[in-house]
Amino acid sequence: LQQTALKDITSADRTSSLNDLRVKYLGKKGAVQGLMKNMKNLPADEKPAYGQKVNKLKQELQKALEERKESLEAAELEGKITSEEIDVTLPGRRPSAGSLHPLTLVQQELEDLFVGLGYQVIEGPEVVEDLYCFERANIPRDHPARDMQDSLYIDPEHLLRTHTTAIQMKVLEEQAPNDIKVICPGKVYRRDDDDATHSHQFTQMEGLVIGEHITLADLKGTLEFLARKMFGQDREIRFRPSYFPFTEPSVEVDVTCHVCGGKGCPTCKQTGWIEILGAGEVHPHVLEMAGYDPKKAQGFAFGVGIERVAMLKYGIDDIRHFYTNDRRFAKLFERFE
Ligand code: PHE
């Protein structure tokens, strides 16, 4: 019995089968208990020796069971550790993270560029006084130029700013008669029907430089730098005469087409040029209203549409893509960050 029992125990390969063996040999109806029962049939003088033998067997089997249990448990634990091991050298799975909006990317790029030229970035409220949006920009109440910008009034004196010029007119008043070098980025609003190229809300960035003898040549150098940084080193720019109430002279600025390089293609409607912004020398009357002496200080201003730059730069064909929050559109710009 001892031999078969020990063989059974050492060949048990799971702790659960050890339990069965414990019942089989050491249980109440087990084999060892059976031997004990035989004792009553023995002569009295043989009983003590027999009892001792059975007890010894019982202890040995208990010991063997215990040992086997320990080694099996150790092996099972070992197996569990290896099977559940984590390979830390495997490439990880990236959690999907958000990315910067293309308008933010372009605005940041423009800001970096101008900060590098010594400009300050100034922002302001989106609801502004009519005074700074129009009056100070040389657009009095009865002026036909008010029609150039369909506006959204909150009350007779306040409106959603139609251009970031509203920020600049405030800066002018605050800084007079000192020199100024600022860019003013921000959202602007117009009463417009939305289509592929128009939105009732879009983003502008205007620049304003005031000082002694700041001329159109300074403006041209600055905008050439801007065009080349944004669209490529071999870009050229040209000025076309235009009209804005707050600048005199006023210009419309074109840049050579970044798609065809100026030869003519569908993007530039075969002209080789693409209009990117409006600009000019600050009107003397605007300077005067803000507290400057136009004989002592002059300056230039320009206003660029962030959407327009982003559309040209990334080849986006519909302004509404910027506002409809399609994940597929947003994901395209992850690599530009
Ligand atoms: N404020 C003009 C607009 O919104 C842009 C502009 C700014 C033009 C500065 C000239 C100078 O259209």
Image (cartoon, rainbow, N blue to C red):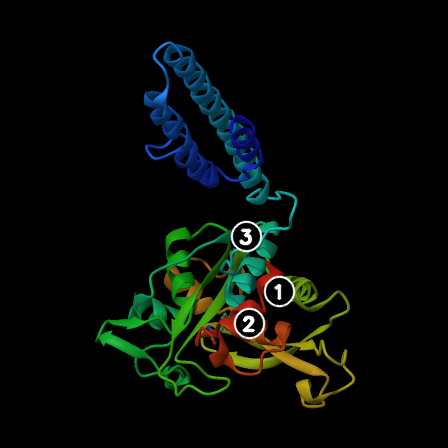
Find residue 88 and report its horizontal and vertical position in percent. Answer: 61, 42
At label 1, the amino acid type is Leu
Instruction: Kindly indicate the quadrant of the structure image that contains residue 235.
Output: bottom right
Of callouts 3 and 2, which one flags the residue occurring earlier in the amino acid sequence?
A: 3
The residue indicated by pointer 2 is: 279
Crowd tier of the residue under label 2, counting other residues whose Cα lies within 10 Å: few below 14, some 14–19, many 20 or above: many
Instruction: Kindly indicate the quadrant of the structure image that contains residue 317.
Output: bottom right
Q: Which mark is residue 119?
A: 3
Q: Is residue 274 left or right of residue 329?
A: right
Instruction: Work out how far the residue at label 2 is from the one at label 1, CA to CA, in angstroms.
Output: 8 Å
Nearest-to-viewer mark from 3 and 1: 3
Q: Is residue 254 left or right of residue 80?
A: right
Of callouts 2 and 1, which one flags the residue occurring earlier in the amino acid sequence?
A: 1
Name which residue lies at 41% across and 17% down: 55
Instruction: Kindly indicate the quadrant of the structure image that contains residue 234.
Output: bottom right
Residue at the far front in the pictured view: 43
Circle 1 SS class: helix
Name which residue lies at 34% across and 12% down: 44
Judging depth in this view, the residue of 71 and 252 nearest the camera is 71
Residue at the far left in the pictured view: 155
Find residue 97 and report its horizontal and vertical position in percent. Answer: 50, 58
Q: Is label 3's Cβ within 8 Å of ligand 1?
A: no
The residue indicated by pointer 1 is: 219
Instruction: Work out how far the residue at label 3 is from the one at label 1, CA to CA, in angstroms.
Output: 14 Å
